[in-house]
Image (cartoon, grey):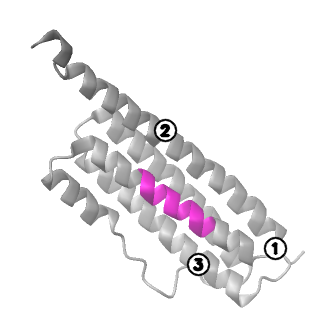
Amino acid sequence: MQPRPLNVETLERLRELAGAMYGGRDELYAAAKEVGDEDLAVICRTLADDLAGDTAYLEQIIVKHGHEPGFEKAVTSTLSDAIMKILRQGRGDEGVVSQAKQAQTELRERMDETIAQSDDPEVHAVLDQQKQHLDFAERVLRQAARSMRKQASAMMPDSRSGS
């Protein structure tokens, strides 16, 4: 049974989204290399692996519809540059996590745009599921940021004690 054909615009959006998702994967791997906390590095690598799997599945849909995976326009990754800038500014792991969280939000927004543009139920179902993965990643990164702030404030001397 042949799948219902996707229109050219939907396929192009899927291809661009796949490119952005691969960029997001690379950004999370870059974040994992740059953070000082090993637990946080493991989280970033795991989220990157999950994103790579979601992207591969998205590319399978594209191939199933008789098109080549990949994307026409190069998607530039800004997170790696932003991470290096954050580290140079001395914002450390918390800044890296904040930037990675922002990248996840931007991917979710691209997914929302693709869903809104498409009338294909399979595309909706797949992207809705992948959005749940991004939502989970954002929650994990948000919790990591909270935990880092809490640790940092616990290490600061209490100004009320006169120290």
Judge whether residue 81 can be spotted in this image.
yes
Q: Residues within 10 Å of mark 2 (few under 14, many from 20)?
A: some
- What's the distance in space between the residues labelled 2 and 3, CA to CA? 27 Å
Query: Is 47 left, or right, of 153 in this rendering?
Result: right
Q: Main SS of the magenta segment? A: helix
Q: Secondary structure at mark 3?
A: helix
Q: Which residue is mark 3?
A: 15
Which quadrant: the N terminus?
bottom right
Placement of 69 over or under 93, stated as above or below = below
Name the residue at 64% across, 55% down. 131
Q: Secondary structure at mark 2?
A: helix
Q: Which residue is mark 2?
A: 140
Residue type of the residue flagged with mark 1: Asp
Q: Residues within 10 Å of mark 1 (few under 14, many from 20)?
A: some
Which badge, 2 or 3, comes first in the chain's sequence? 3
Q: Which mark is residue 120?
A: 1
Residue type of the residue flagged with mark 3: Arg
- What's the distance in space between the residues labelled 3 and 1, CA to CA? 15 Å
For the residues labelled 1 and 2, say whether their Cβ atoms are less than 8 Å apart.
no
Asked whether residue 162 is drawn in magenta, I would say: no
Asked whether residue 103 is drawn in magenta, I would say: yes
How many dots with numbers? 3
Q: Secondary structure at mark 1?
A: loop
Placement of 59 over or under 100, stated as above or below = below
Query: Is 125 left, or right, of 98 in this rendering?
Result: right
Query: Is 81 left, or right, of 146 in this rendering?
Result: left
Query: Is 125 left, or right, of 159 in this rendering?
Result: right
Q: Position of residue 79 (x, y in %)?
A: 33, 62
Residue type of the residue flagged with mark 2: Val
Name the residue at 30% across, 56% down. 30
